[in-house]
Image (tube, grey):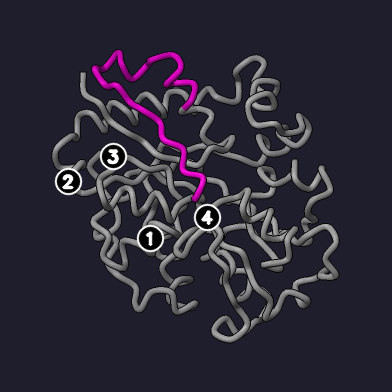
Amino acid sequence: MIDLRIGGVPEHFNYPWYLTLKAKKHQQSGINLRWIDFDGGTGAMIEALTNKTIDLGVVLTEGVVKAIAEGAPLKIIQVYVASPLVWGVHVAATSDLHTAGDLRGKIAAISRYGSGSHLMSYVYGQNNQWNTNRDLSFLEIGDLNKGISSLTQGTSDYFLWERFTTKPFVDQGLVRCIDLCPTPWPCFVIAVHQDFLANHPEHLESILTTINTETKIFKERPGLIQALSLRYGQDPDDLRRWLEDTQWSCSGLTEKALNAVQEELVNLELISEKLPHTLFLEKNI
């Protein structure tokens, strides 16, 4: 039995992983796979993958593309969620900010530099014709709960995070969601360190087979909405809408999608140049 570690955000997107682990399905292939929550999001996972403190990560596409372009020794293995991630743009409930124009030049809370909350702030600014060099300012806060606290305490002005994950805070009256910002590419991919890919191809293939088998039947599970609501504290109607909009995948990231991410990052001056797809993608799994 080999011990392996996988990291991901503690959100409803990753419930299929929880189900495979709870049923000990990976152990049937001789793999003791342990899940590690990363409240800090993709930036924290990229650091852990690079340092080999985890073996696999379920990360945001734009975050890992930027990291690899900057030299991180990682590879994208496959798409995990093919649909876009819809980011909610949040402000404190008592804030006098109501539109995208009101946010220009204000302070955005981000979990950490290189995370989705950071990169998508640039996308949001570009979508609204801001000067992203001049009109964006950041406060690094660490995770979702600290982001909400930052808004309510007034140390930041707005915060981008997945809209259904933050919906309970909206329902509690702590924050308002004033806008939405969808990613123009598949939102989550599975990434690994190059050394893990070279040394454990058979274990990686087994893990992918197990999770892909689960995601293919995931939406058909009886009692799924109730189970998700109980685990993540979200409204069943919100979860139904989220499930309708979300599509899991067992395919590789296409060169077209990769190019779209790279072109956006170059336009935003977050990476210096577009690089060959072979640097990012592993095609042989």
What is the quadrant of the N terminus in the image?
top left
Mark 1 or 2, nearer chain start: 1
| Residue under the image location 61 percent in, 53 percent down | 146
**Camera-side residue: 133 or 180?**
133
**Of label 4 and label 2, which has the lower sequence position?**
4
Q: Quadrant of residue 133?
A: bottom right
**Mark 2 belongs to which amino acid?**
Asp
- The residue at which mark 1 appears reads as 65
Say which residue label 4 marks: 142
Up-down: is 60 above or below 276?
above
Q: Is residue 87 left or right of residue 175?
A: left
Task: Decide if residue 12 is on the left or right side of residue 240.
Answer: left
Label 2 belongs to which residue?
195
User: Relative to 271, is 89 above or below?
Assistant: above
Secondary structure type for disc 4 = loop
Labelled pair 3, 1 in contact (Cβ < 8 Å): no
Task: For the residues labelled 1 and 4, say whether their Cβ atoms are less than 8 Å apart.
Answer: no
Q: Position of residue 205 (x, y in %)?
A: 26, 31
Asked whether the beta carbons under mark 3 and mark 4 sit within 8 Å of each other, the answer is no
Q: Position of residue 260 (x, y in %)?
A: 46, 65
Label 2 secondary element: helix
- Give the quadrant of residue 62: bottom left
Quadrant in which the C terminus appears? top left
Q: Earlier in the sequence, mark 1 or mark 4?
A: 1
Specify the amino acid type for callout 4: Gly
Residue identified by numbered label 3 = 55
Magenta part of the chain: 18-40
